[in-house]
Image (cartoon, grey):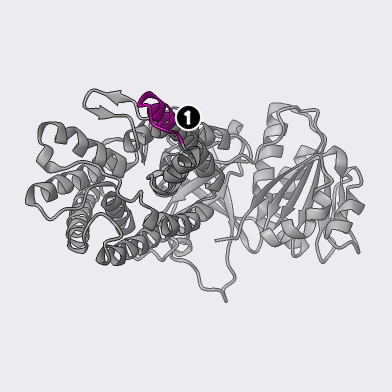
């Protein structure tokens, strides 16, 4: 995600430079080059020094992302005083990652902190410059949309940012209309709407700043709440003395709201054991230093710092296998790639982690949660390692004494790959197994779907009452698409697609 965000911002900077040659954007080409050079140098230097002191792994992409965002937020310049202000903004932005942090995650968007600090300094020293958000121009609107969508698609935040844009634009249109009417000017709603869509910084703010995963809360409704709050404050800036609560200041307030939701989800874990569950599935058991708050079905992001990280970075998402009742033990599982397939740098580093090693969980996210009403019948469809969130859920059911009507359809390549059999058997739920070979010693509540192919028709055959059940499916996107005609008949559908590591 970091590599993709950096490449998108770098591409946008190149486009802005080309447009500046033709006078299509406010800054000149030399102003852009000088400003980016100062920001990159300062952000890299401060991040490197801070991470060296704190013994953290250096992430070059993080430094460059901060520098590029500030390039579009601040006012580029060739003046010495303004470049000093730009350098100060970059330094404050980078330092905020470490000084304004709690349990491994920064509380505020770093670029927003840097821009706000410079704006405050400009009250006393206007020659230092301030935030300008020159990125809000029709010439850059198209590139911001295309490149921003690439980032949002990867981070699965399209709907969150879409809500922010709707709220921000709607509020801004109302505000501008009121101002026009108070000034006695004619109101053309179409022109106002067009200006807010293409000549405001909302697109950039949403795509590259609001969407930052480390400053968003874990649940979708919480993320929507933050998006709405930021949208209102960005669309209708509130004057506070010499400055206003608009744009980056609005985002900082949204970060505070997000912090209230998620401040307890970042903890450190100590690896206790590594277990081989099947020929390809491995389970890692950790001891949590503090209570990790999560709901069965959610996933955590595990940071494994290592040198020479490839494009996929040092963090991965894992569904939590253990139940909240297992605290302080936290378990995750993953499928080990075949020996013929090249391993990512993350997988290699994870394989070398030994018992006693501390790793950081940067957060817990996810809405793959069972219905709040225990009386609601549930269908679980799991393919391979996709069974992990269901293991957490059925274990929680057993340990908490909850009784649900659950049918689990469990797909594996062969019987030896049926992970967590003992845990699922202990829950006493009905299980339909799809494997090439017949599993041995199946309990009475388990059924091997001999001769039945798991497609939409096969799913309807083994679960005839699907229309009465809330369907949950965890597996590769291809399987979800193939089962869609049958799943559409369910009472509701919740998916947890993954593409592997």
Q: Is residue 284 toward the left or the right of residue 478 in the image?
A: left
Q: Which residues are magenta?
A: 174-187
Answer with the quarter of the image where residue 476 lies: bottom right
Q: Secondary structure at mark 1?
A: helix
Q: Identify the residue at image location x=60%, y=34%.
A: 295
**Magenta span includes 345:** no
Q: Residue at x 65, y 45 (%)?
A: 389
Quadrant assignment, res 403: top right
Q: In front here: 343 or 479?
A: 479
Q: Which residue is mark 1?
A: 261
Q: Is residue 218 above or below residue 496?
A: above
For the residue pair 215 and 233, the one nearer the viewer reads as 233
Q: Is residue 185 magenta?
A: yes
Q: Residue 468 placed where, x, y %?
A: 86, 38
Camera-nearest residue between 279 and 393: 393
Any part of residue 103 in sight: yes
Task: Please provide percent x and percent y for residue 156.
Answer: 54, 50
In the picture, residue 22 is in which quadrant?
A: bottom left
In the picture, the quarter occupied by the C terminus is bottom right
Considering the whole magenta stretch, tell me its main secondary structure: helix
Q: Picture coordinates of residue 24 (x, y %)?
A: 30, 60
């Amino acid at each position: 995600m970091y590599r993709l965000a950096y490449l998108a911002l770098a591409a946008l900077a190149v486009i802005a430079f080309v447009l500046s040659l033709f006078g299509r954007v406010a800054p000149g080409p030399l102003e852009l080059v000088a400003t980016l050079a100062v920001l990159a140098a300062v952000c890299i230097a401060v991040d490197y020094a801070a991470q060296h002191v704190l013994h953290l792994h250096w992430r070059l992409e993080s430094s460059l992302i901060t520098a590029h965002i500030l390039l579009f937020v601040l006012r580029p310049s060739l003046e010495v005083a303004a470049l000093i202000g730009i350098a100060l903004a970059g330094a404050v932005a980078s330092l905020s990652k470490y000084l304004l942090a709690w349990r491994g995650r920064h509380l505020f968007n770093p670029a927003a902190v840097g821009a706000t600090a410079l704006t405050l300094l400009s009250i006393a020293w206007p020659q230092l410059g301030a935030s300008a958000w020159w990125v809000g121009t029709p010439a850059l609107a198209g590139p911001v949309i295309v490149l921003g969508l690439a980032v949002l698609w990867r981070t699965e935040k399209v709907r969150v940012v879409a809500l922010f844009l709707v709220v921000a634009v709607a509020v801004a249109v109302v505000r501008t209309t009121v101002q026009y009417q108070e000034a006695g000017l004619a109101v053309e709603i179409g022109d106002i709407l067009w200006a807010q869509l293409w000549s405001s910084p909302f697109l950039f703010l949403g795509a590259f700043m609001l969407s930052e995963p480390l400053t968003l809360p874990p649940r979708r409704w919480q993320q929507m709440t933050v998006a709405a709050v930021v949208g209102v404050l960005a669309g209708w800036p509130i004057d506070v003395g010499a400055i206003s609560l608009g744009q980056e200041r609005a985002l900082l307030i949204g970060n505070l709201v997000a912090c209230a939701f998620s401040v307890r989800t970042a903890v450190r874990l100590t690896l206790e054991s590594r277990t081989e569950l099947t020929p390809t599935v491995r389970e890692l058991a950790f001891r949590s230093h503090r209570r990790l708050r999560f709901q069965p079905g959610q996933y955590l992001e595990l940071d494994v710092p290592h040198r020479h990280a490839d494009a996929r970075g040092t963090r991965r998402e894992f569904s939590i296998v253990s139940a909240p009742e297992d605290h302080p033990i936290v378990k995750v599982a993953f499928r080990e790639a075949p020996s013929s397939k090249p391993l990512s740098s993350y997988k290699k580093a994870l394989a070398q982690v030994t018992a006693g090693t501390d790793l950081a969980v940067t957060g817990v996210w996810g809405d793959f949660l069972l219905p709040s009403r225990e009386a609601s019948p549930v269908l679980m469809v799991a393919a391979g390692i996709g069974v992990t969130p269901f293991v957490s859920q059925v274990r929680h059911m057993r340990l908490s004494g909850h009784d649900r009507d659950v049918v689990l359809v469990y797909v594996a390549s062969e019987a030896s790959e049926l992970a967590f059999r003992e845990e699922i058997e202990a829950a006493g739920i009905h299980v339909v197994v799809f494997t090439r070979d017949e599993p041995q010693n199946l309990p009475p509540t388990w059924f091997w779907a001999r001769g039945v192919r798991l497609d939409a028709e096969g799913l309807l055959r083994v679960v005839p009452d699907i229309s009465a059940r809330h369907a949950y499916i965890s597996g590769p996107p291809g399987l979800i698409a193939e089962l869609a005609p049958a799943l559409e008949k369910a009472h509701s559908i919740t998916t947890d697609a993954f593409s592997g590591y």
